[in-house]
Image: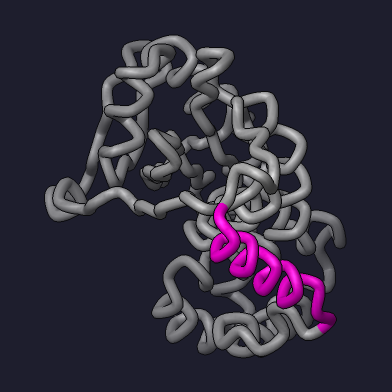
Amino acid sequence: MATRASIITIDDRMMYLTYNHYDGYPENLGKALKTHYNTEELASKISREGYISYVDDETGEITVSNPADKNVKPTTYDLGGQDIDGMAYILAKEINATGADYAYIWNQRGENWVTIKNDGIKSTMDKLENELPTMGFDFEQDDFTNEEKDYMTEWKSFLNEESFFKDDPATIRFEKIRDNAYRMLKHEDGKQVNAYVDALERQIKFKPTDADEMINYDRSDFQADFDDYVSDKMDF
C-alpha cells in the first residue's frame, strides 16, 4: 500500500487539493515541497495538478505513471462563509476522503508548508482548528452575514450529534472487511494491524469500488497486503 497525501492551498477562501499516491511521508513529499515548491506561486501550481504519482525529493520532478491521470482535476471547495470550525471540518473530511496519511497545507502568512497527520476526521479536525488561525484564518462571527451564521449553527448541531458518521455507507460496508482483516491477521502485532485497518478504511472511503475486491480477500490476500503496508511504513 502507498503512503498517500493531500497537497492543499487556499486562495481567497477557495480550497485546491491534489492527490499524491506514493511516498507522501514528510521525509519525501514534505521535503520536496519545502525544497522545490516553497513559494505561493509554486505551491498554488502543485496544488492544482489534480493527481500525482510521486514527487522526487531531490529534483522536485512530478511523475504521473498513468497518462489518464494527467487529466484528473484538483478537488475544489468554496470555504466562503465558514468560521475556523467549519473550515477545519471541511478540510478534514476532504483529506480523509482521499485516504491521505498526511496533508500538506500552504501557509500564506508564514510562507511555509504545514504538515498534518491524518488520524481520522475528528482528530484531524482538532489539529486544523489549532493550525488555521496561524495561517491567517482567524475570522470572528461578526465577519459573517446572518444567513452564514445560521448555516454554521446548523452544521455544528449536526456535528455534535452522537449519530455522526454511523450511517455512512462506506463505513457500513467496511465492517465486514474490517472483521475479516482482524480475524485473518490475529497472529500479527496488534498495533500494526490497527493501523493497517485504519488505512483500509480510508482507502475504501476514497475509492469505494476497492471494497468489491477486498470483501473477497482470503488469508493470503490480507497477509500480502498487510506485509506491503508494513514494509512501506518501514521505508521511513
Q: Is residue 60 above or below residue 83?
A: above
- Per the image, is 122 magenta? no
Towards the viewer: 158 or 41: 158
* Picture quadrant of residue 117: top right
Question: Residue drawn at (28%, 28%), measured in percent from left and top?
Answer: 45
Residue 84 in view of the camera:
no
Left or right of 201 in this view: 72: left
Question: Residue drawn at (44%, 36%), measured in percent from left and top?
Answer: 10
- Quadrant placement of the C terminus: top right
Question: Residue drawn at (68%, 59%), measured in percent from left and top?
Answer: 121
- Per the image, is 152 magenta? yes
Residue 199 in picture, x, y percent from top left: 63, 60
- Predominant secondary structure in magenta? helix
Residue 165 in picture, x, y percent from top left: 69, 79
- Please state the extent of the stretch shown in magenta in the rendering: 145-162
* Picture quadrant of residue 35: top left
Left or right of 226 in this view: 182: right
* Picture quadrant of residue 16: top left
Q: Is residue 169 above or below residue 65?
A: below
Left or right of 110 in this view: 196: right
Towards the viewer: 133 or 208: 133
